[in-house]
Amino acid sequence: MSLNVTTIGFDADDTLWHNERFFQLTQARFAGLLSEFCEATDLMEKLLQAEKRNIIKYGFGIKGFVLSMIETALEVTHNEVSGGVIAELIEAGKDMLAHPIELLPHARKAVEAAKAQCKVILITKGDLIDQERKLAQSGLGHLFDGVEIISSKVPDIYAQIFERHGTGPATGIMIGNSMKSDVNPMIEAGGWGIYVPHGLHWEIEHADPFLDHPRYREIESLAALPDLLNSILKE
């Protein structure tokens, strides 16, 4: 174990397994159901605003997403949306909650490479039951020394987690696809942030990177993680 890094954290959704594409598929289904009431672009903007308003109430995850779709459907139809459409939106949410997990390329090897060097933990936000289901189906659960399913990813939370599972954020690395939730707050807490772009992104998760920060790193995919970790651990 390196003296300058003792604990490595991984995000889950769209870092280790696919997630956002199921939201986008459901949004397309939503647009089709409401096409006679609202153009798809306007509908998606209204849905985004509903999600922003509702995160503080419902948190992150599929259940809050479905409630935001229903709220948006009521808005654009002036409360005249049919019970059939509401039923389809609920069914769409159930489909998302039942969708099999598909690991992203190199996910298993990346976690195994990290575990060979340090303690590894999973840090994810969202609905507790759904996140537990995805972790169980992923086949990666046994590789993690700890799992944290939290409601918010901010510097203070990262500091607490890396104190609990290691020697503090200064000797920790966080790896993820969200600049806003995975990378920037970890750097602000004093640790390393490694950005792994996924390709699909949720507008709410957008943030500018700390490009000039000495503890910011970016890789094209998890395939490059083992070499990057070796480089950091030698510093």
Image (spheres, rainbow, N blue to C red):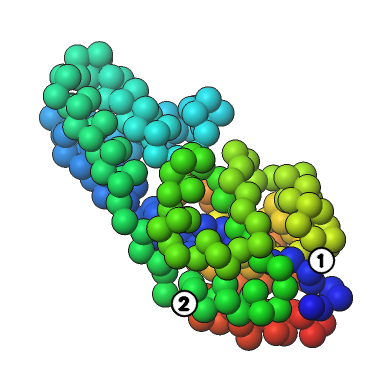
Residue tagged by mark 1? 171
Q: Nearer the viewer, residue 204 or 107?
A: 107
Q: Which residue is mark 2?
A: 106
For disc 1, the neighbor class at 10 Å (few under 14, some 14 to 19, many from 20) is some
Instruction: Say which label, 2 or 1, has the lower sequence index.
Output: 2
Q: Label 1, secondary structure: give it.
A: helix
Q: Is residue 124 left or right of residue 130?
A: right
Q: Residue at x 78, y 47 (%)?
A: 160
Q: Which amino acid type is marked by label 1?
A: Thr
At horizontal 43% and vertical 53% (from top left) the residue drawn is 134
Q: In screen coordinates, is 201 left or right of 120?
A: left
- The amino acid at mark 2 is His
Whether 166 is drawn above or below 131: the answer is below
Above or below, 70 against 78 in this view is below
Give the residue displayed 63% in from the left and 49% down from the top: 148
The quarter of the rendered structure image containing the C terminus is: bottom right
Front residue of this view, candidates 210 and 179: 179
Q: In this view of the protein, can residue 3 be seen by the observer?
A: yes
